[in-house]
Image (cartoon, rainbow, N blue to C red):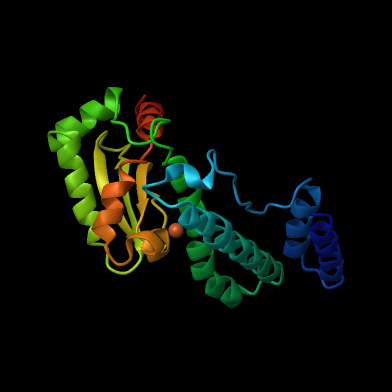
Amino acid sequence: MYVYMCTKTIKDFRMLCRVTPKAVRVIGRRALSSEPQVARLPDIDYDYHELEPFISGEIMELHHSKHHNTYVTNYNATVEKYLDAEAKEDIATMISLQPAINFNGGGHVNHSLFWKMMAPPGKGGGGEPTGGLAKAIDSRWGSFEKFKAEFNAKAAGVQGSGWCWLGYNEATGGVEIATRSNQDPLTDLVPLVGADVWEHAYYLQYKNVRPDYLKAFWEVANMDYASQTYDSASN
Ligand SMILES: [Fe+2]
């Protein structure tokens, strides 16, 4: 952190030598901040091995410490470039960086949710929805089992890499299944349940059989989190 802040200070000083009014405003905002606005890899509330036998500890460790961490690193590096381009009023570069911000920022947001949306079996994982969410699912699909069947069919059908979500629609007051490609985040629904269907989430254990991974996912899906998030969003 110290090295990072020093690097930023030197860079900011260099930028001040060729300032524009907008650059001064940008640098001023950053200088006033006590902490750089950087993404950080979050801790997980359970140990990597605690989702076994449904998701192996090896997958969890690689997924969190390597894959998610890479999204965090690349997001921060891209934002740094973006801020430099903004300070130089280099609009073309700012536009060219936006796909990388979406991809890596989405990867960070999605995975940060994903760790919370799972829990060890018996400690929140593998349960059934309660309260308002249980009623909303029953109203829409008839039963939790029928909902899971449709969710798994849509998740299995995601072409290439992506995510499948159960989300709360604040406009309609209903719950919906939604899929997204790559790391596009779910921005128009409140995420309640999310299944990462990138191969890195399951290949070491389930090889190419994504449906088997999805069947196991429900043994660790944190329905306490989903039910509580639904209550917060709908009240
Ligand atoms: Fe992932």
Identify which residue, 22 or 192, lies in the foreground: 192
| Residue pictured at 14% horizontal, 38% vertical | 141
Query: Looking at the rendering, in which quadrant would you find the N terminus?
Result: bottom right
Taking the spot 67% from the left edge, 54% from the top edge, the residue there is 38
The answer to whether residue 53 is visible is yes
Residue sitting nearer the eye, 31 or 65? 65
In the depicted structure, whether residue 118 falls above or below residue 108: above
124 horizontally vs 72: left or right: left
User: What residue sits 18% from the left and 48% below the top?
Assistant: 150
Q: Is residue 174 above or below residue 157?
A: above
Residue 198 shows in this picture:
no
- Percent position of residue 74, x then y: 60, 66
235 is higher (above) or lower (below) than 146: above
Residue farthest toward the front in the current orientation of the protein:
53
Q: Position of residue 48 (x, y in %)?
A: 52, 47
Q: Is residue 212 left or right of residue 220?
A: left
Instruction: Report how many numbered discs are placed on residues in the image.
Output: 0
Pinpoint residue 51: horizontal percent, then vertical percent.
Answer: 43, 44
Q: Position of residue 45 (x, y in %)?
A: 54, 38
For the C terminus, which image quadrant? top left
Q: Quadrant of residue 89?
A: bottom right
Front residue of 186/32: it is: 186
Instruction: Give the side of residue 150 with respect to residue 217, left or right.
Output: left
Q: Is residue 6 left or right of residue 175?
A: right
Which image quadrant shows ligand 1?
bottom left
